[in-house]
Image: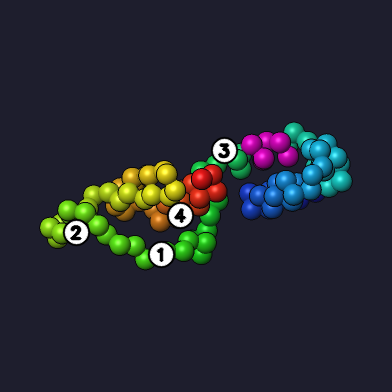
Amino acid sequence: MRKRRDSGRWAAIVATYEKSGKSVPAFCAERRLKVSTFKWWRWRLRSAPVAAARTPSEVRLIPVDVVGLAAARGTEPTSIEICVSNVSVRVEVGTDATYVAALVAELRSRC
């Protein structure tokens, strides 16, 4: 009977491949993986939303200073603007913290 791998195991396999420097056929041959299955999982994991790939324990909250008219008037803001280098992103209040953390991490890696 063949052993099925879950998405977490495939994520680890794809990460190992990316660090290996080997071709897909060579990597798959060493591990007795079907090339087509490996390529499908690699595509699936790359196209999956970033937030789904993160676990809540990976989210680090940082202190922020609220500035602007809303803070001065005492009203609650409906969105938050995050600035990383020369890029600004506005997210609605209540947006999933895991998603926002992944978004900021991706911006940092590209700026």
Camera-side mark, 3 or 1: 1
Q: Residues within 10 Å of mark 3 (few under 14, many from 20)?
A: few
In the drawing, what numbered circle is on residue 62? 1
Give the residue at x 55% y 48%: 109
Identify which amino acid the numbered label 4 is placed on: Ala
Which mark sits nearer the N-terminus, 2 or 4? 2
Residue highlighted by disc 4? 101
Q: Position of residue 96 (x, y in %)?
A: 39, 53
Answer with mark 4 or mark 3, whichever residue precedes in sequence: 3
Separation (CA) of disc 2 from disc 4: 23 Å
The residue tagged 2 is 71
- The boundaries of the magenta stretch are 38-43
Q: What residue is shown with label 3? A: 47
Label 1 packing within 10 angstroms: few (<14), some (14-19), many (20+)? few
Q: Real-space Cα distance between discs 4 and 3?
A: 18 Å
Q: Are marks 4 and 1 in contact (CB under 8 Å)?
A: no
- Do callouts 2 and 4 mark residues in contact (Cβ within 8 Å)? no
Q: Spot the residue most to the front.
A: 86
Q: Amino acid at mark 2?
A: Ala
Q: Viewer-proximal residue, 13 or 21?
A: 21
Q: CA distance from mark 1 to mark 2?
A: 19 Å
Closer to the observer: label 2 or label 4? 2
